[in-house]
Image: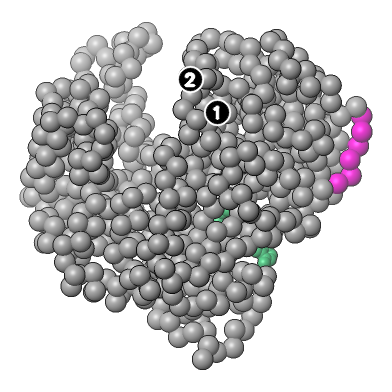
């Protein structure tokens, strides 16, 4: 019998609690944003280990980003102190790496095999294709071929041959790449029932958050790790699938039901995050293409009732200053809106700190105007960058330099990593053509040529990350390859957060500004192309992205668009995102009076409000 549930589960509502109390067998939790999916997942695991006698080392919690995995580990540490360090929290890639490290011999790898980052992959491919340009062009096809075992459409004999030679070359260097991290463990497990049994025995309780973003290989890994009647919990929201174009998202929810026929299902219907008007607007945006047509989602009612604001700016700069001004006003206490015909709201917004604000955008490029406006206003911010450190100019080249010293093969094994990085940088600097520095000053350096400044910056970037690793070169490479980000975004810092819609997944903020909600950016469309040319599946995915962004907001949501925008050096007139047309007129109020240059019926309608 399950012991008394104690106070842990008292922090869940009846539906969440019901899910947490299903302690055995396959479980599928499909629920909308802010319904406490992640909260239920962590409480359920804490309940298993503290109240149900489940050994913590048999629990495995998987999610998609390192940051999310770390956050989960933190929450578990708070909920189940003492047990938490023995619970495995992982991303799919770190789990794959763990299995490979343990089974390296079966995989034909050395005990200290390395992970090929982007630069090393390019270097290996360039050896085969003859030059870097064609390597860059062919790598995606090679990757696709390797991921699908040749099943990808439109691949030819040339790609198959390259892929095979690419794999051999990696193995000669004792390297695996990112695709291998999941594909190799899957292949090992598929070939060996004994191995499957051993891992099933080790991880007897498996939970996956953000299940809507699982792909084919990851799904195969899950199926191998959990028997059909195993304790596998998948938690997700099909309407928040933003990483794939193929519509396979719903597919994996359906596959779960087929492959785990004993699965019980729980739906969570109460949203604890967003004020009612925000939730209403978000649901109107997703409604036309929702993948969960029978969804129920009710506001919990304690997040205020400020209306969603649609701001129509004349330019990108005006849009950004509106963001800065509004933050100043909200921080100041009263939420007085200059654009709002002098009306003063007293909606309880005072008491907000900088960390309560987030500005979300579709493309990194849009951050510039926002950063300029915040800097002008003297407002502190932090940008959550999406680039991996390994993809920064200079960093990749330094890593490539290091990649050719296969792990364990270097005679001077104990050299501090930082020293190695410096030596690699020196070697690179020496190889730069003598005139590179002059060119840099003229601003005429071709984009593919590295400057000495970039190399110095790269060393600086790598320093904290290198110092932490001491003389463990392998750890350094692993950390970089697993996607350490340049990102110094600190969830606890009292700063305004700037981040892409993609990076906002799973997070929440009291006040959210969604900038550039306009035709051409949402859905994203290359300048100069027509909306009719877009793949309908891409448009659906972009709509889900807007849905994800809107549902990050707790109390205030500002959606804005500019009447003109400069992209790739050309200034064009733009209109609001077509997705906004699905908002009911009563779902929002409009501020700003910029009139789009090309009036369409829909824009006229907005102007009348
Ligand atoms: P997303 O789909 O965006 O990942 P989610 O379903 O994972 O959202 P959570 O992040 O777990 O939702 O929860 C959203 C917010 O609601 C959090 O601040 C959480 O603490 C709060 N919350 C969830 N359930 C409850 C509850 N039963 N009582 C009070 N607050 C709750
Ligand atoms: Mg979540």
Q: Is mark 1 within 8 Å of ligand 1?
A: no
Q: Is residue 412 left or right of residue 212?
A: left
Instruction: Please tell me how crowded label 2 is: few (under 14), some (14-19), or many (20+) other residues with Cα within 10 Å.
Output: few
- Would you place residue 466 above or below residue 81 in this image? above
Is residue 75 a member of the stretch shown in magenta? Answer: no
Q: Which residues are magenta?
A: 342-347
Q: Which residue is tagged 1?
A: 523
Residue that sits furthest to the bottom in the current view: 1
Whether the residues at callouts 1 and 2 have beta carbons within 8 Å, the answer is: no
Q: Is residue 475 left or right of residue 591?
A: left
- Would you place residue 297 above or below residue 605 in this image? below
Kindly identify the residue that appears in the image at 72 percent across and 12 percent down.
Answer: 599
Kindly identify the residue that appears in the image at 48 percent across and 58 percent down.
Answer: 209
Q: Which residue is tagged 2?
A: 533
Nearer-the-camera pick, 227 or 463: 227
Kindly identify the residue that appears in the image at 62 percent across and 76 percent down.
Answer: 9
Identify the element where label 1 is drawn. loop
N-terminal of the pair, mark 1 or mark 2, is 1
Name the chief secondary structure element in magenta.
Answer: loop
The label nearer to you, 1 versus 2, is 2
Observer able to see residue 489: no
Residue 329 percent coordinates (x, y): 80, 36
């Amino acid at each position: 019998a399950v012991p008394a549930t104690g106070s842990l589960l008292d922090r869940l509502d009846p539906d969440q609690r019901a899910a947490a109390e299903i302690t055995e067998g396959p479980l599928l939790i499909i629920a909308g944003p802010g319904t406490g999916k992640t909260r239920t997942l962590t409480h359920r695991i804490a309940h298993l280990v503290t109240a149900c006698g489940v050994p913590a080392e048999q629990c495995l919690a998987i999610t998609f980003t390192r940051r999310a995995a770390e956050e989960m580990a933190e929450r578990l540490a708070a909920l189940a102190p003492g047990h938490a360090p023995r619970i495995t929290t992982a991303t799919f890639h770190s789990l794959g790496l763990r299995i490979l490290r343990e089974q390296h011999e079966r995989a034909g790898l050395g005990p200290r095999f390395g992970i090929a980052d982007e630069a090393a992959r390019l270097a290996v491919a360039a050896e085969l294709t003859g030059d870097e340009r064609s390597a860059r062009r062919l790598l995606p096809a090679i990757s696709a071929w390797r991921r699908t075992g040749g099943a990808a459409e439109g691949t030819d004999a040339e790609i198959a041959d390259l892929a095979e030679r690419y794999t051999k070359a990696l193995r000669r260097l004792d390297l695996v790449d990112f695709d291998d991290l999941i594909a190799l463990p899957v292949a090992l497990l598929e070939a060996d029932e004994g191995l499957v049994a051993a891992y099933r025995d080790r991880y007897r309780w498996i939970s996956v958050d953000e299940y809507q973003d699982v792909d084919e290989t990851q799904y195969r890994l899950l199926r191998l790790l959990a028997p059909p009647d195993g304790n596998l919990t998948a938690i997700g929201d099909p309407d928040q699938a933003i990483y794939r174009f193929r519509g396979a998202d719903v597919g994996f929810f359906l596959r779960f039901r087929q492959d785990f026929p004993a699965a019980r299902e729980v739906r969570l219907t109460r949203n604890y995050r967003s004020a009612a008007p925000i939730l209403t607007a978000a649901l109107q945006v997703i409604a036309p293409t929702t993948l969960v047509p029978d969804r129920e989602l009710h506001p919990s009612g304690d997040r205020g009732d400020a209306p969603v604001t649609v701001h129509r700016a004349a330019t990108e700069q005006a849009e950004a200053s509106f963001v800065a001004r509004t933050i100043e006003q909200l921080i100041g206490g009263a939420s007085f809106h200059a654009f709002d015909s002098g009306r003063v709201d007293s909606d309880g917004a005072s008491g907000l700190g900088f960390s309560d604000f987030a500005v979300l955008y579709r493309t990194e490029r849009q951050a510039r105007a926002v950063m300029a406006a915040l800097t002008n206003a003297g407002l502190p911010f932090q940008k959550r960058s999406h680039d991996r450190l390994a993809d920064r100019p200079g960093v990749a080249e330094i890593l490539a330099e290091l990649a050719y010293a296969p792990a364990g093969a270097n005679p001077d094994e104990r050299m501090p990593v930082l020293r190695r990085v410096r030596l690699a940088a020196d070697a690179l600097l020496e190889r730069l053509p003598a005139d590179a520095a002059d060119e840099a000053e003229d601003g005429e350096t071709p984009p593919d040529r590295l400057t000495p400044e970039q190399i110095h910056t790269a060393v600086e970037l790598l320093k904290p990350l290198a110092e932490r690793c001491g003389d463990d070169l392998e750890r350094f490479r692993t950390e970089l390859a697993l996607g350490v980000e340049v990102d110094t975004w600190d969830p606890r810092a009292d700063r305004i957060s700037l981040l892409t819609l993609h990076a906002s997944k799973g997070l929440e903020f009291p006040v959210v500004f969604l900038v550039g909600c306009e035709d051409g950016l949402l859905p994203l469309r290359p300048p100069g192309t027509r909306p009719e040319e877009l793949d309908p599946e891409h448009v659906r995915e972009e709509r889900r992205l807007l849905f994800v962004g809107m549902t990050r907001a707790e109390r205030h949501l500002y959606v804005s668009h500019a009447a003109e925008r400069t992209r790739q050096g050309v200034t064009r007139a733009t209109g609001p995102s077509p997705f906004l047309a699905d908002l009911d007129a009563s779902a929002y109020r409009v501020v700003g009076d910029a009139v789009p240059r090309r009036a369409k019926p829909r824009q006229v309608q907005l102007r009348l409000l």
